[in-house]
Amino acid sequence: MESWMGYSGFLLEMIRAAGVEIGDEIVVERPDGSSFRGLLMFKGELSAENIVVIKLGNGYNVGVAVDPSCRIRRVAPGRKPAFVRPPPPPPREGLPRVKIIGTGGTIASRVDYRTGAVRPAISSEDLVSLVPELSEIATVDAEVLLSVYSEDLTVREWGMIAEAVWRVLEKREFSGVILTHGTDTMHYTSAALSFALQRPPVPVILVGSQRSSDRPSSDAALNLIGATWAAARAPFAEVVVAMHAGHSDDAIAFHRGTRVVKMHTSSRSAFKSVNASPLAVLRGQDLTVLDEYNPRGGDGFSYEPGFSDRAALVKFYPGMSPEILEYLAERGMRGVVIEGTGLGHVARSWIPVVKALVDSGFFVGMASQCRFGRVNMRVYNTGRDLLRAGVVELGDLLPEVALVKLMWVLYRAQSLPDVSKMMITPVARELGARMLPEGVEPA
Amino acid sequence: MESWMGYSGFLLEMIRAAGVEIGDEIVVERPDGSSFRGLLMFKGELSAENIVVIKLGNGYNVGVAVDPSCRIRRVAPGRKPAFVRPPPPPPREGLPRVKIIGTGGTIASRVDYRTGAVRPAISSEDLVSLVPELSEIATVDAEVLLSVYSEDLTVREWGMIAEAVWRVLEKREFSGVILTHGTDTMHYTSAALSFALQRPPVPVILVGSQRSSDRPSSDAALNLIGATWAAARAPFAEVVVAMHAGHSDDAIAFHRGTRVVKMHTSSRSAFKSVNASPLAVLRGQDLTVLDEYNPRGGDGFSYEPGFSDRAALVKFYPGMSPEILEYLAERGMRGVVIEGTGLGHVARSWIPVVKALVDSGFFVGMASQCRFGRVNMRVYNTGRDLLRAGVVELGDLLPEVALVKLMWVLYRAQSLPDVSKMMITPVARELGARMLPEGVEPA
């Protein structure tokens, strides 16, 4: 069947009869009296034949179901989406220098008008063109290291990113480093960099966006401006994630790299610090710092690269068989972080399996699938029996961070006692500073 | 080495020299000038030799490290923990009748003074003795069905619980049914009962407590009073979880069984409705209902028991191998719910593996590891390619609820198209009522 820009059948005939091109402003009128006005868009391949896709005035694309009794009218000719703006103004003398390293993600992406999908496409240089405000804040030097969806990143890319940042930090020419990154796994990468780049001399800031920069609701510009401001001027020299602090367009939160998760699939304020406040919040030029931090220019920068891919994360659920642990060990894994229930539990049937694996040198750490709080395995008998079987209680380590830490630890420790000891020794503020006495719960 | 109540060595000698018994009020004075006053407690087996465990005035047990230079003084003789109170007052005429079925958990547990741990021990009858206020609200008829930690529950126990509730509902003698339940997996069980007991004629209320009933901060009494009030009088006849709505002791939230998760390891307000408000909140005698509901006494009660144990839940992480899916299929699983990243993604390397499994009749559904929001796999190419490979987009189904639903669906549907169709067809308000058009994101 003939197809044009994703349209076919009776709908394509209606579009042709109306003389409409992609990007033209149209009105779709339905016999029920409803009508939709917007720009005609290319259509996704998975869309049903009777759906016409238009971009509404608020920037959202909607699919409108039509039938032959509907009417499509052309209202105005389209302006083709203009994406690449003029080159940025020349750098101003005396501004701090900030390095931007692109790794991919929506903040460096644009809508593909063939499929309607969003693809990583734009270099960091383009970002500077798109956000001219950056040149008021800093002299930006941008390069593209990777251009991948963040769900495709592995320990290998974490190593490449850490090395690229380390090379920049070693030169001591920049006031801060920014990494543009897909948001899906930004919190895993921020944890990895927190372990690999300890006590950096300047801020290392991961930044992403939840909505691509050609949409009116995009968070890309504000996030990038906030990240650049902090890279140039913030007093803290830590690995942080910079993203919208709330739904309004006026505040950027800086979350500690080992304390942050993506908490919402689509909200612009999707990233939240867990069991902690953000390290700092920026409103305009006002930075409010909410916790202790590693200051700029401090001593003791330590580059500790290397991650093992022989660690796994397993989320427990009712009735789950412990054989998954044996499978992982047989596949060459050297350890696992379990997301247990509540204070850190799994079914009693797991205990002998755990014990046998620990006895063979396999690491088993326990975190909680509850998003907040900390494991405490001394309250119930199951927890106590798991401890006796050799499970290591991971305190308030977030499960995702515990996995990343285990990957980092397994690269540098061989014996199980060394692995276990490193896992519960704080490295990058990933474990609660205030360890509560036995039997006392956090509020 | 000699041991008494968990104490040994120099510490046992100090305790003996002070003439102290378990339960006595003591003061521990340390050379640094600090001192701790409280009741001497039995000590956990995992505790180090130099730790003395005391119950502070606020009800918390703390472990205090001592050395031979410390001093232990007896302040007052102990009152032995009095747990079992007098039997409840006789039932009053004309009150609604409420059935309480015990399945275990902290709300039906007490501290084991041998180990300091908490064990399920008390029957539901004991609970009525412990909370005499219940007899003002309803005539309570209690029985113990199970007495297990909730992390040990499986599809088998879900079936037993559903059947027990069904038998009660069939008799039509009670105004409501309460299930006491451990909190660790209460949200999994509430989802299971929501699918198995559709449109019940009276409320079915799961209730637990985060802190055992012999602690001053216990939430057991208020939760049980709130659950009993709602079982007797609430206008909604749904499967709900009744737990503290906030940190203060004045409100109980009723969360829809398919919309709730345990969000905190230890907080009394650990349970939260996700992507939804609680169905209702009770303050004193004031019930505020916040959503539509199935009313009491409505028609259409349907008992749909049976769960398959051949469904799995897998949380994706960076670098994770897709071979886990093949392993699960080889182990006899018929389907999996993936907790993908962001809007519902996994690494591209998973796509061919997913496709081969789906082609063989294996169900693959996608939820998100972000706690809030909904999957939308039409935004990025990875999502679109996963859909093309046969992944089913699970909307705003919570991953835990999606797993339980898959267990329920696999028991009744054989073909993959039937499984897929049932998974995206709302049964118990587990899927968002307002489905947004393509390209429109929830706020």
Image: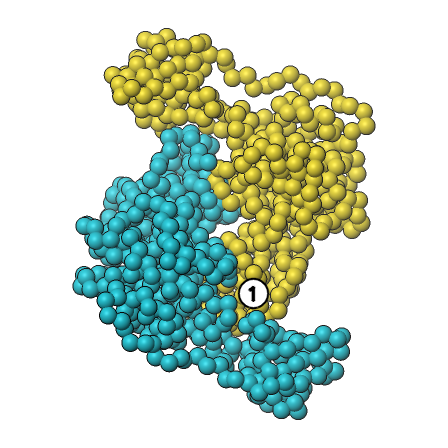
Chain colours: A yellow, B cyan
Residue B200 location in percent, x, y? Answer: 24, 54
Q: Residue at x 38, y 33 (%)?
A: B436
In the rendered view, tell whether residue B60 sits above or below residue A261.
below
Q: Amino acid at mark 1?
A: Glu
Q: Residue at x 57, y 71 (%)?
A: B58
Instruction: Tell me the quarter of the picture where residue B383 sits.
Output: top left
Residue A283 location in percent, x, y? Answer: 65, 36
Q: Residue at x 35, y 49 (%)?
A: B289
Viewed as shown, does residue B110 lie left or right of B230? right
Q: Residues within 10 Å of mark 1 (few under 14, many from 20)?
A: some
Instruction: Tell me the quarter of the picture where residue A69 sits.
Output: top left
Q: Which residue is mark 1?
A: A441
Residue B140 location in percent, x, y? Answer: 29, 69
Given residues B325 and B59, the one toward you in this image is B59
In the rendered view, tell whether residue B315 sits above or below residue B417.
below
Residue A203 location in percent, x, y? Answer: 71, 41
Given residues A394 and B364, the one toward you in this image is A394
Instruction: Tell me the quarter of the picture where residue B350 sits.
Output: top left
Viewed as shown, does residue A332 lie left or right of A178? left
Instruction: Tell me if I can see residue A3 in this picture.
Output: no
